Image (cartoon, rainbow, N blue to C red):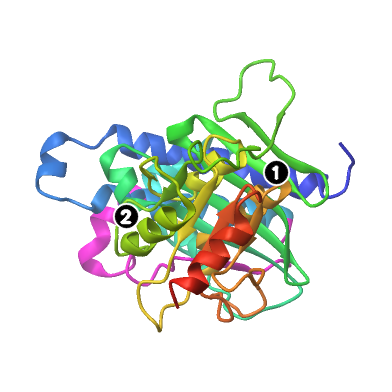
Amino acid sequence: MSRRFEWEREVAVRAVREAARLCRAVAAEIAPEAMAKKDKSPVTVADFGSQAIVAHALASEFPDDPLIAEEDSAELRQAENAAILERVVGHVRAIRGGHGEEIDADEVCRWIDRGGAGDYCDRFWTLDPIDGTKGFLRGEQYAIALALVLGGEVSVSALACPGLDAVFYAVRGEGAFVVPLDVPEVPGPPVKIHVSARKDPAAVRFCESVESGHSAHGDAAAIADRLGITSPPIRMDSQAKYAVVGRGEADIYLRLPTRADYREKIWDHAAGAFLVAEAGGFVTDIHGRPLDFRHGRELADNRGVIVSNGRLHDQILDAIRELQIV
């Protein structure tokens, strides 16, 4: 592997790995009765704690790089959320305290607020501190997704998927790789991943979101029927869907529009889409256009996201046109 973006890659992988440790620690504290009461405070704690960890890592190594992230600390600073803030600080200390840092609530909130950038510039990072919050609460799939955007194109991405026990990363022009989430004492070399070569509709599998509010399941079923795909969809939360397509366990991921005015957030797709592209796959919107990261916090010029191993991509786009999915 070349040394291009080596430091960015190392920092990104380390940051999402530490954030995943924090998220797992929070998840381990979730009691069954909290789930029964639909208590969302654990995911709130993990979400803010994860963003604090990653934002601090980036600020320490790349202080001039803006960060576009999902959260800010305004809600966390409210008096009624003091107990949640205290829990966030406690979990951040558990991860970062061994580095000899004095960490208090104001410090953690400042780290979180580093993610408040919103305007496009030629070099910035984008972060989803927990992608798949309902998956996190169910003990299923979620991800910590981080990407570096240069000149409007993703150049480095890191995707920690605790449910897959893995960190996936990609560097422009060098491919996509997977390493263990928990670092062994003598870590082995990263494993390069590739999309599948499947193109027989009878063998093809596609992914979609668990929540129908995130993607139009009916339209996805119509596309599958038009292509002759007979296997039921793999439904999972988060950008873990990109990971399973990237390493060839599924072949297609459909994120279809659910309403005319909705635009995808960049942090929901930057890391995963780049991973699939570097693994040899194709990623476009429903009109066949590449994802455009030059419009701040949203994919303002794109509608939906179509991800594939490339073998059936044109057929998927044809089906979308024929079905008049807009």
Rendering coords of residue 175 (x, y %): 77, 43
Residue type at numbered disc 2:
Thr
* Nearer-the-camera pick, 168 or 9: 168
Is 159 situated left or right of 90 in this image? right
Q: Secondary structure at mark 2?
A: helix
Q: Which residues are magenta?
A: 62-88
Q: Is residue 55 above or below residue 181?
A: below
Residue 264 seen anywhere in this rendered image of the structure: no
- Whole-percent x and y of residue 75? 32, 69
Q: Could you say where residue 111 lies in the image, as x and y percent from the top left?
A: 53, 60
Residue drawn 60% across and 63% down? 126
Q: In the figure, residue 72 lies in which quadrant? A: bottom left
Indicate the amino acid at tag 1. Answer: Ala
Quadrant into which the N terminus falls:
top right
Query: Is 71 in the magenta?
Result: yes
SS for callout 1? loop
**Is residue 55 in sight in this rendering?**
yes
Q: Position of residue 38 (x, y in %)?
A: 15, 50
Please tell me whether residue 103 belongs to the stretch shown in magenta.
no
Residue under label 1: 279
